[in-house]
Image (spheres, rainbow, N blue to C red):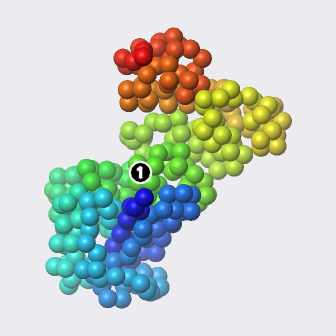
Amino acid sequence: MKKRRVIFFLFDHVHLLDLAGAVTVFYEAGCCGHPYELRYVSPFTAPGTSSGLGFTQVEPLGAITVQPEDIVIVAGMDLSKWDHADDGIWIPWLQHAAGIGATVCSVCTAAFALAVAGLLDGRSCTTHWGYTRALQQHFPKLKVIENRLFIKSDNIYTSAGISTGIDLALFLVEEDHGPAFAYTVARDMVVYIRRDGASSQQSIHLQHRQHINHQVHAVQDHITHHLHTKLVLSELAAMVYMSQRNLTRLFKSITGITIGEYIRVLREEKAMQLLKEGEKLAWVAKTCGIGSTRQLGQLAKKAGLKAKMA
């Protein structure tokens, strides 16, 4: 399978964590089983970081022709040292990427670059909280929103300050490979997956996996991959070398929900998704470990879904 390409666009005086956070997410995704091709481009011959560190193996913009399936991530930079002398080189490059439908993202202050290129006109967007007012004042056609981790507007994504590039990158991985895999990547990075309150993602994964307890993660992963089987508390406890009582207490204290409730909601969520995709009632019930087609039919009716009986 061809690797999806992620192209990191570097301005001079780029903020290191704005770049490295997102890079690490896609690198770890590869370590976890879904590799991406990582490329680095810049309109500058020798870009460096705002902290004084330089780079090698950064390609000129002309070395890469952006394709619609690519992800382009522009990392934030020190605006006080932003050199606009080469705007005529990089603006058409970014405009082309956005115009052909590639996913174009900004981290932190890089929202100003997307704005200069006209990519945010009429769109909702965000940036570092310390720059939201300036972004709105300099670019009145934008709809700058505060207190959001990241915002998606068609194929254009903007994220807030610094570490939110990690949140955005995890969201992109989630769009490609699902929430369970995104949580695997987040767990390997020992970070939380955060979501804005306005996020459309209300998955059971997102509601109850914002923690870093490896034992509870192991139980949740096992449940996710064995919904079709009979899940026994004693076996789950033995898997993480705990007593049933301790696991029950730990799981509830960490997630805010009991193991039984977690299994039930996860099964129901997966079942509703499969029914939406047009799968047959009996197959869905078996796949999700739901006891009877009658029970599943009642759930589907409650959700307003018309289930296929056969």
Residue 105 occupies quadrant: bottom left
Q: Position of residue 138 (x, y in %)?
A: 20, 65
* Image point (69%, 49%), residue name: 214
Q: Position of residue 128 (x, y in %)?
A: 37, 62
Q: Which quarter of the rendered picture does the N terminus lie within?
A: bottom left
Q: Which residue is mark 1?
A: 176
Amino acid residing under circle 1:
Asp
* Image point (46%, 19%), residue name: 281
Residue 200 occupies quadrant: top left
Q: Which quarter of the rendered picture does the C terminus lie within?
A: top left
Residue 109 occupies quadrant: bottom left
Q: Which residue of the protein is positioned furthest toward the bottom in this rendering? A: 46
Q: Is residue 280 above or below residue 102?
A: above
212 horizontally vs 175: left or right? right
Q: Nearer the viewer, residue 108 or 165?
A: 165
* Image point (38%, 76%), residue name: 40
SS class of the residue under badge 1? helix
